């Protein structure tokens, strides 16, 4: 059976050891996509609050940004391993940690579910999700995020900020141009992820990650926060 590859990015905030029930419902949803819907999920898991705790503690003690990114990557892989273990034998373990691993796995006839974390310093797991989409030929990324979607301005600073339901990639790039990139603080989408999505015409759908069924709904063209269309 040739399953359709779909990249799903899950914020690390929803794959933390303090909420095994939520991890289980993500695992069930992913297994269901694999068993019943002809989809092969390539899942990229973020670092969430645990990554930020490590990064903040090490930053206070003088570690440089690349090292802090490495700490973040370790936590993303720990979270990814937790989710892959919860999926069981339909998922690849140990979780892949290089581009070469993903290339090999994308041609693996067992078509098992792939769950992974970060790759290298200087980017976020959103960039990883774009790279994985490019390699696997997924023309879509479902981004299960801690935010609702793309706003026309920072909703934390401006109460009148508007959620943009449908937005062009070039507009998002412009909106996020001023964003700074530090370990643990790559916001909504980093420039790397947008550049890759642009060159390979990948659509990004942002949904709230606190409920795994939002991912399924987005796949069925149901509820979503924002859709970012390639230009
Ligand atoms: P993320 O910031 O991508 O995690 O990775 P996240 O959980 O998706 O983010 P939130 O919580 O929803 O906002 C955690 C950290 O790991 C490092 C970065 O420092 C990043 O902030 N990282 C991750 C890398 O350096 N390279 C990668 O490829 C991935």
Image (cartoon, rainbow, N blue to C red):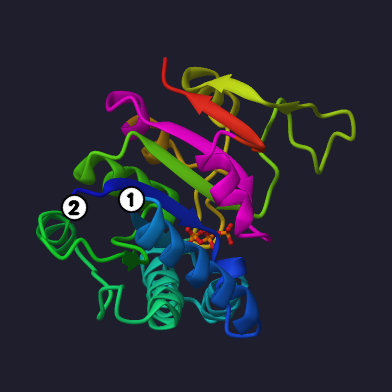
Q: Which residues are magenta?
A: 196-221
**In this picture, is 97 found above or below 170?**
below
How far is mark 2 from mark 1, CA to CA? Answer: 8 Å
> Which residue is disc 1 drawn over?
38
Q: What is the count of numbered marks?
A: 2
* Residue depicted at 60% across the width and 83% down the height: 20
SS class, disc 1: loop
> Which residue is disc 2 drawn over?
1
**In this picture, is 210 found above or below 93?**
above
Residue situated in front as seen by the camera: 50 or 182: 50
SS class, disc 2: loop
* Residue depicted at 56% across the width and 50% down the height: 215
Based on the picture, tell me whether residue 143 belongs to the magenta stretch.
no
Residue sitting farthest toward the right: 159
**In this picture, is 123 found above or below 203?**
below
Q: Few, some or many C-alpha atoms within 10 Å of disc 1 (few <14, some 14-19, many ≥20)?
A: some
Q: Position of residue 187 (x, y in %)?
A: 58, 48
* Residue depicted at 22% across the width and 45% down the height: 136
Q: Kindly tell me whether residue 103 is visible in this rendering.
A: yes
Q: Tell me if label 2 and label 1 are in contact, CB under 8 Å.
A: yes
Q: Kindly tell me whether residue 187 is visible in this rendering.
A: no
Based on the picture, tell me whether residue 216 belongs to the magenta stretch.
yes
Residue situated in front as seen by the camera: 215 or 147: 215
């Amino acid at each position: 059976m040739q399953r359709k590859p779909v990249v799903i990015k899950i914020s690390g905030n929803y794959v933390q050891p303090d909420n095994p029930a939520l991890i289980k419902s993500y695992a069930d949803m992913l297994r269901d996509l694999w068993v019943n819907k002809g989809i092969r999920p390539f899942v990229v898991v973020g670092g969430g609050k645990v990554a930020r705790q490590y990064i903040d503690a090490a930053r206070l003690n003088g570690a440089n940004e690349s090292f802090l990114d490495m700490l973040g990557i370790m936590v993303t892989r720990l979270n990814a391993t937790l989710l892959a273990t919860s999926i069981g034998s339909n998922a690849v373990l140990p979780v892949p940690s290089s581009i070469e691993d993903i290339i090999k796995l994308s041609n693996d006839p067992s078509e098992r579910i792939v769950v992974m974390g970060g790759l290298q310093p200087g980017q976020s797991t959103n960039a990883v999700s774009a790279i994985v989409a490019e390699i696997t030929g997924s023309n879509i990324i479902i981004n299960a995020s801690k935010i609702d979607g793309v706003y026309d301005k920072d909703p934390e600073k401006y109460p009148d900020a508007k959620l943009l339901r449908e937005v062009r990639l070039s507009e998002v790039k412009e909106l996020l141009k001023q964003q700074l990139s530090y370990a643990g603080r790559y916001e909504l989408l980093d420039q790397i992820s947008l550049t890759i999505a642009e060159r390979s015409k990948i659509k990004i759908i942002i949904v709230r990650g606190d409920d795994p069924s939002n991912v399924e709904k987005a796949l069925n063209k149901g509820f979503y926060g924002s859709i970012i269309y390639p230009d």
